[in-house]
Amino acid sequence: MAKLVALYKKPADKAAFDSHYFSKHIPIARKIPGLRGYEVSSGPVGTPAGESSFHLVALLSFDSLEAIQQGMASPEGAATAADLANFAQAGVDLLIFDTKEV
């Protein structure tokens, strides 16, 4: 299993971000080939010391790093990436990695 983690920084207008993210971005992203699971944070995103600079965290699951790369290179992946400019003006950090049970 591999993950793509999107760490969305706190936007100036949280309500506008949430409206676009949940009504438009998620339906676009769900069409990425190879996507096996899609989870998002619920409530404030913090650190053990308190607040963080992040508004929302998304965890997308794929079978492998290759599947992430293929999915993101597809027209659906390109549409998902292009949509970031419509709501994530504060910035987003994207991380990809393999996972294993320990």
Image (cartoon, rainbow, N blue to C red):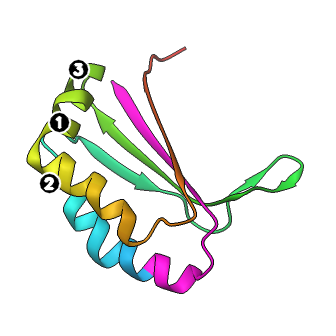
Stretch in magenta? 1-18
Give the number of the mark in front: 1 or 2. Answer: 1
- In the image, 62 versus 86, the foreground residue is 86
- Reading the chain from its start, which is encountered first: label 3 or label 2? 2
- Residue name at image x 54 percent, y 58 percent: 41
In the displayed structure, 37 sits above or below 87; it is above
- Residue name at image x 53 percent, y 85 percent: 15
State the residue position of label 2.
31
- Residue name at image x 13 percent, y 51 percent: 76
In percent of width and height, residue 78 lies at 19, 49
Q: Is residue 7 left or right of residue 23?
A: right
Assign the N terminus to one quadrant of the image: top left
Q: Residues within 10 Å of mark 1 (few under 14, many from 20)?
A: some
Q: Secondary structure at mark 1?
A: helix
- Measure the C-alpha gap from mark 3 to mark 2: 17 Å
In percent of width and height, residue 99 lies at 44, 21
- Measure the C-alpha gap from mark 1 to mark 2: 13 Å
In percent of width and height, residue 66 lies at 23, 20
- Residue name at image x 40 percent, y 37 percent: 4
- Reading the chain from its start, which is encountered first: label 3 or label 1? 3
Type of amino acid under label 1 = Ala
State the residue position of label 3.
66
State the residue position of label 1.
73
Type of amino acid under label 2 = Lys
Residue 23 on the magenta span: no
